[in-house]
Amino acid sequence: MSDIVLKTEDLTKHYGGVHALEGANFELRSGEHVAIMGDNGAGKSTFVRQITGVEQRTRGKVWLYGKEVDFAGPLDAREAGIETVFQTLALADHLDVPDNLFLGREKTKWDWLGPFRLLDYKAMRQDTLDALERTGVKIPNIRNTIERMSGGQRQCVAIARTASFHSKLTIMDEPTAALGVQETAQVENIIRTLKEANEPLILISHNMRQVFDLVDRIIVFRRGRICADLDIKSGDYTGEDVVSYITGAKTGEEYMETAT
C-alpha cells in the first residue's frame, strides 16, 4: 500500500490572464511535515485553496490516499479528512468555543427522537476542555463568544479545533503570523504533538526558524511555480539556500526539469 497521503499533478489556477498557480506537482507522505514557503503572491495560499475546494482549479488532479478527489467546497474536504486553519480563521464570532469546535459536527442526545434530536452541550463542553488541555491552549472562559477574544486567542481556538479531531491531513496557513511569543510556542507544541501522532501536516510559513525546527521538507514557490523541494533533515540546506530560491538567486531549474 502506498504511503502517499496527498498528491497533485499539474495543479493550475488562472484568474483571467493572471497565472497564480502553474503545473504544481507535489507529494506528501504518511507522517511527513512539509513547509510551503515563498514571497507574497508566489502561489502558496492559491495552492491550498485548490486542494481544499475553496476555489475550483483551472486544471490538474488531486489524490488523497490514492483516491482522486475534486471537492466542491471546504466542507467536502473536511468530510474527507482534511482539517485546515486558514488565515481568515473561519470562526463564527457570535458563538462560544465549544460551538466553534463542533460547528458542523455537533454532538446530539436523544437520537431516538429522530429529527427532534437535542444538542449535547454538556458533552461538547467537556470535550472542548479536554481538547484545550491536550493541545496546551489556554482559554480563561470557554463560554465567551469569539468576538470577545483577542486575536491570539481566536487563532488558538482555530488551531485547537483543527488539532482536536484526528484528521487524514492537517493544513495550517500562517498559523502564528499574528501571535505573540507565548502563543506561538503553544502552536508549535501542537504541531509537534501532531508529528508524534504521525499525522501529516502542510505548514505555510514565512518564519525560517520555525520551519527548520518543525518540518521535514520545504517546498518553495516562486511566481506561481514550485521551484525547489528541499530535504532539510538531511542537513544539506540552510536558510540562505531557501532565501536564494525565494528571491530567484537560485532558479530551481534542476528541480523543474525533474518535476516535469
Image (tube, rainbow, N blue to C red):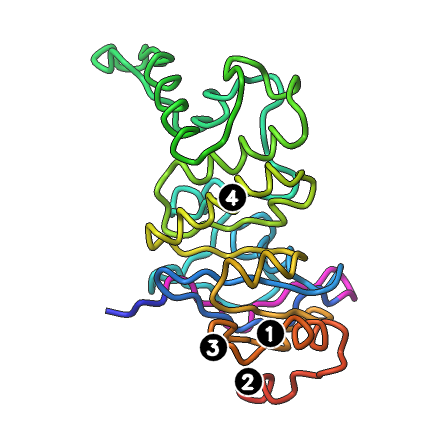
Magenta span:
5-18
In front: label 2 or label 3: 3
SS under mark 1: strand
In front: label 3 or label 1: 3
User: In this image, 98 relative to 42: left or right?
Assistant: left
Q: Residue at x 68, y 57 (%)?
A: 206
For the residues bearing labels 3 and 4, Cβ distance under 8 angstroms: no
Name which of mark 1 and mark 4 comes first in the sequence: 1
Q: Which residue is mark 1?
A: 23
Q: Which residue is mark 4?
A: 74
Name which of mark 3 and mark 4 comes first in the sequence: 4
Name which of mark 3 and mark 1 comes first in the sequence: 1
Name which of mark 2 and mark 1 comes first in the sequence: 1
Label ID, residue 260: 2
For the residues bearing labels 2 and 1, Cβ distance under 8 angstroms: yes
From the viewer's perspective, is residue 15 above or below residue 125?
below
Quarter of the image for the N terminus: give it: bottom left
Q: Please, what is the three-letter code of the amino acid marked with disc 3?
A: Ser
Quarter of the image for the C terminus: give it: bottom right
